[in-house]
Image (spheres, rainbow, N blue to C red):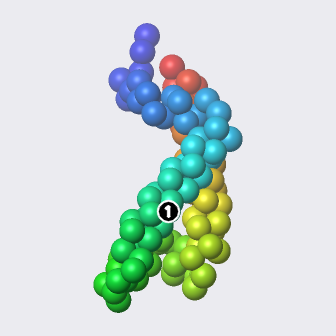
């Protein structure tokens, strides 16, 4: 007998819930890649950098640019923030998978 409210978990949830630490690692890597691409983009305008380029760069470094002024510190903050978010997603997915297994 199956429970009518049971739904199969998505592939992402199954992957994230399997190993929360791996999910945290990949979220940290994702934030790092985004920040490095933003840095490359702003440095490509370096000889004639404008105020608009600086503004766009600070937006691209969110959430680190909200709390920190130095871009190097913002990059480190974003990597740590991504790892914490990834760990949270992994733990929530693991808990959800555990609850779904109990419903079966």
Place residue 69 in its image quadrant: bottom right
Find numbered disc 1 in the image and state the secondary structure of the residue it sits on. Answer: helix
Q: Viewer-proximal residue, 71 or 103?
A: 71
Image position, residue 41 (x, y; %): 39, 66
Indicate whether 81 appears above or below 92. below
Which residue lies most toward the bottom here? 51
Q: Quadrant of the N terminus?
A: top left
Image position, residue 62 (x, y; %): 47, 72
Place residue 95 in its image quadrant: top right
Indicate whether 82 appears above or below 96. below
Q: Is residue 47 left or right of residue 61?
A: left
Q: Residues within 10 Å of mark 1 (few under 14, many from 20)?
A: many
Place residue 79 in its image quadrant: bottom right
Residue at the spot 57% in from the left edge and 49% down from the top edge = 29
Which residue in the structure is indicated by mark 1?
35
Indicate whether 31 appears above or below 14. below
């Amino acid at each position: 007998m199956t429970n009518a409210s049971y739904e199969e978990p998505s592939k992402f949830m199954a992957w994230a819930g399997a190993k929360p630490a791996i999910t945290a690692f990949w979220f940290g890597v994702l934030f790092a890649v985004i920040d490095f691409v933003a840095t490359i983009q702003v440095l490509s305008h370096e000889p004639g950098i404008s105020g608009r380029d600086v503004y766009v760069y600070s937006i691209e470094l969110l959430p680190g640019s909200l709390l920190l002024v130095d871009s190097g510190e913002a990059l480190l903050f974003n990597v740590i923030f991504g790892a914490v978010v990834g760990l949270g997603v992994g733990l929530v997915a693991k808990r959800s998978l555990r609850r779904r297994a109990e419903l079966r």
